[in-house]
């Protein structure tokens, strides 16, 4: 039995979102499917003290060797997707859904018999039997089947009943009331009866429009003729159809057939997440994480290129069908269809007519022709901008990002990979020792405004978020912003002077008000102080100008610390004084670690910058007026509605506001007029 701690994901890796999760055994077989409103809370509960787990749960988590999850938008989508996957994978630990033979009900058509039969079926699937579902309630299937047999009068009786009627040469009651074509009595040929069954299957595959329109017309006609009881019958039949065809998983409206491709990437790797939507329902999910092809030069086109590669892999084995009857039939369906419900939908193995992507592939024209030959219909690419399709594309992209982040986190958490990365860094950079503490710095601003910096720390090759720090960049004396190299020099100066002060045992406070304390260990808590450790390597975000400025700053402070720069475009490593960068192998563990460090520092700087920028954007013109606090600002806005009205108000009008005295009204008016003159 496996140890659950050997495959337990980090709590920080698990999204706190609704979703569905799957436990797999060492062979890759899905053994349990579950849903959760909060994936993080639910999954962590499986890895608590084993003695507190239910015996069956204990056995499940010790049988499994991995766990995966898919994020959805809400609990209903999680519930219905869980149902779909339970029936697809038949996990052996999901017995609660099969207790007392109460498995999910399907509408089945036994095309393996000479006279196909339509019935409600549960349990294991049989060969050459077509299944539609699963559905939440069996009675809705029976009620709708009762309706459908009036339009498609296929056989519904049991084999014993059918054989008895065949011997007697007369049909049962269903044949006499028009709800069965009575193949037992020879009222219809086997070929014609099979065609009826095919038509029923096409209806259940999505071609529902004609029947629903006919029922609606009959309902309205009966209502106009004051036949309200008959109209109510048609109304109930329509409701039954809608219940049976009710979406049973995360869907697009109107029974859309589509592939939804989400792509997430960094400079070295990409993740692809594909949702196969058929008939409006998610029929399958695939995802991969791989290295970016070495021939890729422009990452801006990577999402489209990745989508094209995935489509070629998925459908490359399908035969071409030029000028086939399938093409003609589907073109006729598209021409004659009054709505999407008039069109029969595809299986997940076939090429859908619509591909939803975040970016259209560069070779879209040729790819569409290639896919069209295998689809039998014209295939189009679309990048939705709004609505349900955009939401589903965002869901695929979100899951791709989760898959990529999970892959990166698991790699950095691998002790052997981290050790390999640190050893490679020592070798490639010719360091005197393995860099056990690495500090990364990045600058963020918007055209010189709200300039900030970040410092992130990797210890033993893993992030130490408790040691992260943020800096506010001090502008020049005239208020103008610093350039990136000067800003980087300022940040490194402040960081390293703090280190020197602590090592020298100085007392007092730094520029951000934090006490200077000597020694790496706090005697009160026994914990390491954040800034007392000397870095073994400094990494700055940028190329040769940034790394030369950093090296110059370190030299001016009289310190000897190795520093490198990582340029984002080609992942080049710049070393001070060198004219050409160091290029590491794309599969190098050291390069992955440096990239992770750089991305962390960039994320931290961007987050700090956005907070500062948003705070600056919410500053009011009333903030600088003495005596006008939040309460009086609210009173002024409630009275005048807009800042423009406050600016145009007279002293007398301002004094009418509750809490504003005549003296304060004069002060407000003078300040606003002074601002207008400026």
Image: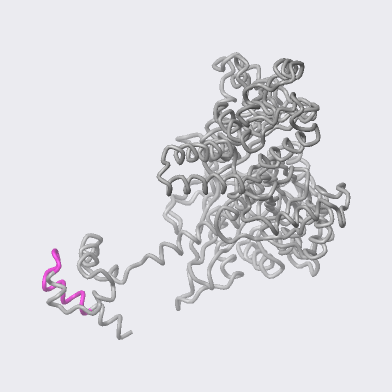
Q: In the image, residue 519 lies at what x, y percent?
A: 53, 43
Percent from the top left, x then y, of residue 565?
70, 61
Tally of numbered discs: 0
For the magenta stretch, what is the residue range? 657-670
Residue farthest along the bottom direction in this orientation:
677
Horizontal side, residue 41 vs residue 459: left or right: left
Q: Quadrant of residue 60?
A: top right
Q: Quadrant of residue 444?
A: bottom right
Quadrant where the C terminus is found in the figure: bottom left
Judge whether residue 572 is colored magenta. Answer: no
Q: Residue at x 79, y 65 (%)?
A: 365
Instruction: Work out whether residue 109 or residue 616 is closer to the camera in this orientation and state it.
Output: 109
- Asked if 141 appears above or below 450 in the picture, the reply is above
**Whether residue 460 is visible:** no
Q: Is residue 287 left or right of residue 178?
A: right
Q: Position of residue 474 (x, y in %)?
A: 48, 67
Q: Is residue 371 visible?
A: yes
Which SS type dominates the magenta stretch? helix
Q: Nearer the viewer, residue 551 or 319?
A: 319
Between 530 and 232, which is closer to the camera in this rendering? 232
Query: Is residue 151 depicted above or below 143 in this figure?
Result: below
Instruction: Name the foreground residue: 536 vs 149.
Output: 149
Question: What colour scheme was applied to this rendering of the protein?
Answer: one colour
Give residue 640's position: percent from left, percent from top. 22, 70
| Relative vertical location of residue 588 with respect to residue 178 in this rendering, above or below | below
Q: In the picture, which quadrant includes the N terminus? A: top right
Instruction: Classify residue 27 by image quadrant.
Output: top right
């Amino acid at each position: 039995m496996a140890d659950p701690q050997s495959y337990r994901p980090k709590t920080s890796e698990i999204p706190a979102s609704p979703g569905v999760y799957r436990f797999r055994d060492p062979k890759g077989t899905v053994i349990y499917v579950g849903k959760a409103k909060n994936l993080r809370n639910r999954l962590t509960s499986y890895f608590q003290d084993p003695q507190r787990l239910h015996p069956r749960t204990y056995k499940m988590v010790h049988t499994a060797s991995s766990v995966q999850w898919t994020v959805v938008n809400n609990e209903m989508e999680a519930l219905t997707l869980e149902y779909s996957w339970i029936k697809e994978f038949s996990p052996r630990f999901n017995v609660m859904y099969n207790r007392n033979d109460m498995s999910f009900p399907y509408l089945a058509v036994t095309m393996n018999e000479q006279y196909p039969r339509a019935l409600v079926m549960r349990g294991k699937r049989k060969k050459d039997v077509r299944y539609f579902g699963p559905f939440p309630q069996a009675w809705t299937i029976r009620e709708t089947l009762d309706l459908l047999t009036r339009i498609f009068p296929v056989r519904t009786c049991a084999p014993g009943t059918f054989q008895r009627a065949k011997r007697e040469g007369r049909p049962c009651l269903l044949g006499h009331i028009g709800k069965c074509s009575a193949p037992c009595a020879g009222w219809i040929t086997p070929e014609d009866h099979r065609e009826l069954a095919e038509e029923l299957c096409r209806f259940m595959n999505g071609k529902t429009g004609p029947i629903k329109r006919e029922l609606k017309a009959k309902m309205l006609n009966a209502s106009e003729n004051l036949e309200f009881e008959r109209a109510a019958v048609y109304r109930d039949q329509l409701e039954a159809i809608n219940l049976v065809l009710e979406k049973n998983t995360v869907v697009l409206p109107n029974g859309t057939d589509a592939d939804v491709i989400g792509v997430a990437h960094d400079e070295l790797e990409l993740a692809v997440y594909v949702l196969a939507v058929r008939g409006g329902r998610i029929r399958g999910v695939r995802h991969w994480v791989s290295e970016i092809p070495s021939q890729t030069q422009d990452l801006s086109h990577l999402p489209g290129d990745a989508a094209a590669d995935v489509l070629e892999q998925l459908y490359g084995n399908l035969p071409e069908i030029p000028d086939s009857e399938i093409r003609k039939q589907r073109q006729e369906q598209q021409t004659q269809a009054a709505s999407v419900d008039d069109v029969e939908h595809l299986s997940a193995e076939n090429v859908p007519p619509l591909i939803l992507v975040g970016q259209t592939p560069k070779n879209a024209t040729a790819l569409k022709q290639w896919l069209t030959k295998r689809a039998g219909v014209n295939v189009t690419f679309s990048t939705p901008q709004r609505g349900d399709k955009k939401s589903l594309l965002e869901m695929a992209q979100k899951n791709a990002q989760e898959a990529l982040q999970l892959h990166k986190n698991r790699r950095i958490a691998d002790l052997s990979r981290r050790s390999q990365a640190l050893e490679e860094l020592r070798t490639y950079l010719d360091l005197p020792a393995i860099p056990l503490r690495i500090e990364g710095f990045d600058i963020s601003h918007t055209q010189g405004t709200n300039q900030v910096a970040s410092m992130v720390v990797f210890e033993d090759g893993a992030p130490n978020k408790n040691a992260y720090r943020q800096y506010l960049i001090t502008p020049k004396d005239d208020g103008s912003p610093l350039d990136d190299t000067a800003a980087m020099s300022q940040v490194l100066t402040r960081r390293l002077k703090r280190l020197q002060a602590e090592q020298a045992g100085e007392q007092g406070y730094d520029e951000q008000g934090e006490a200077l304390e000597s020694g790496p260990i706090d005697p009160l808590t026994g914990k390491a102080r954040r800034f007392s450790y000397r870095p073994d390597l400094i990494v700055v975000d940028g190329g040769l100008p940034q790394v030369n400025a950093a090296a110059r700053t370190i030299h001016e402070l009289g310190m000897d610390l190795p520093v490198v720069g990582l340029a984002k475009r080609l992942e080049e490593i710049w070393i001070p004084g060198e004219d050409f960068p160091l290029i590491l192998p794309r599969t190098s563990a050291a390069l992955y670690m440096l990239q992770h460090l750089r991305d962390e520092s960039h994320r931290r700087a961007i987050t700090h910058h956005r907070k500062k920028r948003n705070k600056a954007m919410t500053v009011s013109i009333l903030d600088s007026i003495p005596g006008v606090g939040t309460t009086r600002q609210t009173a002024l806005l409630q009275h005048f509605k807009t800042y423009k009205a406050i600016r145009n108000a007279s002293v007398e009008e301002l004094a009418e506001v509750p809490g504003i005295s005549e003296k304060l009204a004069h002060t407000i008016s003078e300040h606003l007029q002074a601002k207008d003159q400026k």
